Image (cartoon, rainbow, N blue to C red):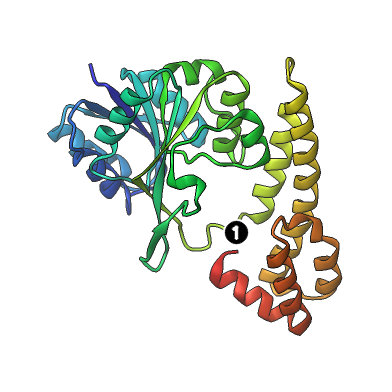
């Protein structure tokens, strides 16, 4: 029986799936299994996965009619047999020491459900930087449900117990399903701990942020509103939801402005920027952006596109 089951949902992933599988095969510990769910791909994704499965009995392929990432992850989890589960996107990577490092960390910190970790962010131009580089993420800490209400702070490639999946019932089909999953897990009583080791690689695809600004903002607002209706919330959680929903509401306005700028629609941009000031938690960033906006909304749009701020 494998100790860790890694579940990958793949759709038309022929360009990256071999690297993703290769990063799992290269693990320093061998007590893992990999379940790749081909979610109705029309390219050679299944062919590539089948080759690995033929060479390594720990690699399994499940094919299904296209049903979306959430359904594919849930299907893969239903077949997984490991004590722990790891969900991985079909273009992300695990470091060779991921399984070994996470299991050692879990042994040192027993009784938790979500063993998160740091990752390298792989940019489209090939550069890498740490996903988390602040002082907090340099050490071990745990997130509460209130923390996750305020901000999405867990990467997908965390290692989780089966209890976490049972508490949530799996992923729901919606935009930002990762955030929804972690939030529901913590609200249901899952216990989180963060491993500061960099054990994975998160790939940022070209245009990934700029194409989905509004969808992400609107989905975060819906997720917060939906989970705020749960029974049994504490007073602290209700207060956190109230504040987070207020911020998410004005963030939708900010994203609407940013999408307009990226589409080179500049009319009324300066006034819209002023109205969205509450959606900038970093006031210095807002002031700097305001100065740039006064000079030229077109310049602001170019800086945003280049830096994906």
Q: As rendered, which of 121 and 135 lies closer to the eye?
A: 135
Disc 1, SS: loop
Image quadrant in which you'd find residue 25? top left
Locate residue 81, reporting x and y percent.
31, 17
Image quadrant in which you'd find residue 64? top left
Locate residue 201, reporting x and y percent.
36, 50
181 is higher (above) or lower (below) than 308? above
Q: Which residue is drawn at 57% across and 58% down?
A: 209
Q: Residue at x 15, y 32 (%)?
A: 56
Q: Which residue is drawn at 66% across and 74% down?
A: 301
Q: Residues within 10 Å of mark 1 (few under 14, many from 20)?
A: few
Q: Which residue is drawn at 24% across and 40% down?
A: 97
Q: As rendered, which of 176 and 13 lies closer to the eye?
A: 176
Locate residue 279, reporting x and y percent.
76, 55
Locate residue 54, reporting x and y percent.
15, 33
How many numbered circles does the render carry? Answer: 1
132 horizontally vs 293: left or right: left
Residue at the far left: name it.
55
Q: Can residue 218 be seen in this view?
A: yes
Residue that label 1 marks: 211
138 horizontally vs 184: left or right: left
């Amino acid at each position: 029986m494998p100790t860790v089951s890694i579940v990958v949902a793949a759709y038309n992933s022929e360009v990256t799936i071999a690297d993703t599988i290769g990063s799992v095969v290269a693990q320093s510990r061998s007590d893992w299994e990999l379940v790749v769910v081909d979610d109705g791909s029309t390219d050679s994704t299944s062919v590539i996965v089948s080759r690995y499965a033929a060479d390594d009995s720990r690699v399994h392929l499940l094919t299904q009619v296209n049903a979306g990432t959430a359904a594919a992850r849930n299907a893969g989890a239903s077949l997984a047999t490991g004590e722990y589960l790891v969900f991985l996107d079909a273009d992300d990577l695990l470091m060779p020491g991921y399984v070994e490092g996470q299991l050692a960390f879990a042994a040192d910190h027993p009784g938790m459900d979500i063993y998160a970790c740091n990752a390298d962010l792989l940019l489209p131009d090939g550069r890498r930087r740490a996903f988390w580089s602040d002082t907090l993420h340099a050490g071990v800490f745990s997130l509460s449900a209130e923390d996750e209400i305020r901000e999405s702070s867990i990467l997908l490639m965390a290692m989780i117990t089966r209890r976490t999946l049972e508490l949530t019932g799996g992923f729901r089909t919606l935009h930002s399903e990762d955030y929804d999953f972690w939030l529901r897990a913590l609200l249901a009583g899952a216990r989180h701990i963060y491993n500061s080791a960099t054990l994975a690689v998160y790939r940022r695809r070209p245009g990934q942020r700029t194409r989905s600004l509004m969808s992400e903002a609107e989905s975060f607002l819906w997720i917060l509103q939906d989970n705020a209706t749960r029974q049994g919330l504490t007073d602290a959680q209700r207060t956190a939801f109230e504040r987070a929903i207020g911020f998410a509401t004005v963030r939708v306005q900010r994203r609407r402005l940013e999408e307009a700028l990226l589409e080179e629609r500049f009319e009324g941009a300066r006034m819209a920027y002023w109205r969205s000031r509450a959606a900038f938690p970093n006031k210095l960033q807002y002031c700097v952006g305001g100065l740039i906006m006064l000079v030229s909304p077109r310049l602001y749009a170019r800086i945003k596109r280049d830096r994906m701020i």
